[in-house]
Image: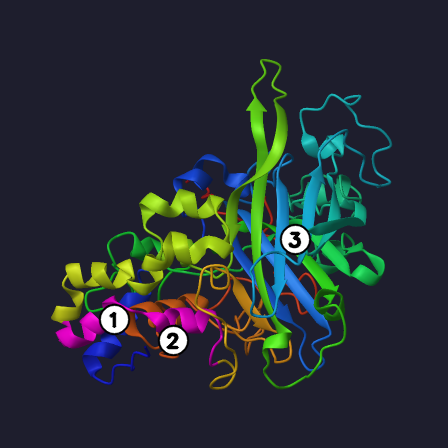
Amino acid sequence: MRIKSFLSLAAVALAILCASVALASSHREAQAVLEDPVIDNTDMYAWVSDDSHSRLYLTAGYNGLHEPGQGNNQTRLGCNVLYEFHISRGIGSLNDEIAYQIKLDCGKPVRVDNTNLELPPGGGKELLVQLGGQQITYTVTKVVRNGENKTSTVIGSNCQMAPPNVGPVTDRVAYGLGPFTGYNGNNPSQFEDGLYDADFVRSFICDMGDEGRAFVGVMDDAYQLDEKGIFDILNLANLPGGRRSPGEDVFAGFNLNVMALDVPTETVLGGPIPHNGTCGDDTMLAVWASASRRETRKLSKSGVDQESGAWIQVGRQGLPLVNAGLIGVQDQGKFLRTQPINDVNNFGGYFLFPILVRDLEFLGLYKALGVPQATVNALKKDRFDILQVINLDNIPAAGCHHVPIANGTTGDVLRLDVATDSQFPNGRKIGGGATANDSQVDVSDVIISLIAVGNPAAGVGDSVNYNDKPYLKDFPFYALPHQGLNGGHGKPTP
């Protein structure tokens, strides 16, 4: 059914309030990821280049809330984790047709090329990782499924992961960006943030030939939200008696571990785009990301644990806010270990009878704002409109797609029609807004408006609508990482 948008002033106020209950897209949304942060997929993005739609961009963030100045061992990705982007075509089964696997090689470190240090000063036994010159590499494997058969091909090997932006001394000495000039705090150029620039980041883009490009490294977290006010029981900006205005972006100053792919759209579709500028089921993709660990882990007193057995999925991400905003806390761990193809059987009730609406009713917010009980009742049950938005039924035009609402064909995936320009919920972009640090669409506003108000186009929000840094204009698109020395959240002592 389709829920009509509210027209009353009370409903507008409710919409603003409901946006406040959005969690960080999927940052630490379940106990399982708190205990294993390297599998914590915070956000996933997928979109095609404008006009020709010839390029497909896939990005995923992991292990978020990375404090830039975290010292010797920066927050990083997992060495024993299999990271994947999963893609199915059309409107049929959500089984993978193509998957891109990214696996880090954290074996013997290799030295970053530079002219400042010929050998590690500690002879290979270092206290400071940066002086040891550690460089992690990764491999990209493309898996193509044809019926029951799968073909795996390594399309990127010995790709170098971009290092963290530790600070100006590290940037100069360990990364070869300039000579060490001493600790001169009175010399602003010594501590400028300009050495770790876009060109340095792009030097770590891995060329995979006809299969595209890859990037793995630390970048700025592209998500924004007033999370402080959310968890003080909706004590947000722009509400009567709210704590402040405007809201505060709690992700400002934090970095993120990013994986990004730039691949030709034709290689994913299996041929040229059959039509461009119009909607059709034959140009639909369903995309999601996952993290998997080996089935068995044996702890060792030596500190080097042994892992063996089959890969078991332990984390996943498709649409933003599904596990954090729809799935009940008692099932969030199960959600991470199951796949979208089984979402209707496992979690269909959470989509059709959203907990968020029931919580808002329990707290008395609908009643306090004068929302008719009949409207609340309609928002609480049979919410096929939520599934229709997920499936792009009427995007970009009415009746565009006809995805069956059934187990195996509907689930937590980011749908993308590559024949039309990408704009959430048809894919999800990094940046793309009117200004350099503006997102094209504030996804938390859209999803919470849909769930709690019944109108995804209501445009409500929490007054946090911009990233804290400008996005890059091209691949890998994320803003540059915050510097460890001058960035982050430390405070000088008096």
Quarter of the image holding residue 48?
A: bottom right
At x 76%, y 34%, the residue is 133
State whether residue 165 is above or below residue 145: above
Q: Earlier in the sequence, mark 2 or mark 1?
A: 1
Q: Is residue 223 visible?
A: yes
Which quadrant of the figure has residue 283?
A: bottom right
Among numbered discs 2 and 3, the one appearing first in the sequence: 3
Element class at badge 3:
loop
Q: Which residues are magenta?
A: 369-394
The answer to whether residue 265 is magenta is no
Q: Determine which of the numbered discs, if any, sits on residue 379 in the image.
A: 1
Q: Would residue 339 appear left or right of 50 to someone viewing this image?
A: left
Q: Position of residue 186 (x, y in %)?
A: 63, 47
Q: CA distance from mark 2 to mark 1?
A: 13 Å
Q: Earlier in the sequence, mark 3 or mark 1?
A: 3
C-alpha distance separating marks 3 and 1: 52 Å
Residue on which disc 2 sits: 456
Badge 2, how many Cα within 10 Å: few under 14, some, many 20+?
A: many
Distance from disc 2 to disc 3, alpha carbons, whole Å, reads: 42 Å
Q: Nearer the viewer, mark 2 or mark 3?
A: 2
- How is the structure coloured here? rainbow
- What's under tag 2, amino acid-wise? Pro
Q: Quadrant of residue 109?
A: top right
- Residue 351 screen position, x and y as percent: 35, 62
Figure check: 223 above or below 463: above
**Quadrant in which the C terminus is drawn:** top left
Q: Helix or strand or loop: what does disc 1 sit on?
A: helix
Give the numbered dot on residue 192. Answer: 3
Between 241 and 59, the residue placed more toward the observer is 59
Task: Categorize mark 3 by other alpha carbons within 10 Å: few (<14), some (14-19), many (20+).
Answer: few
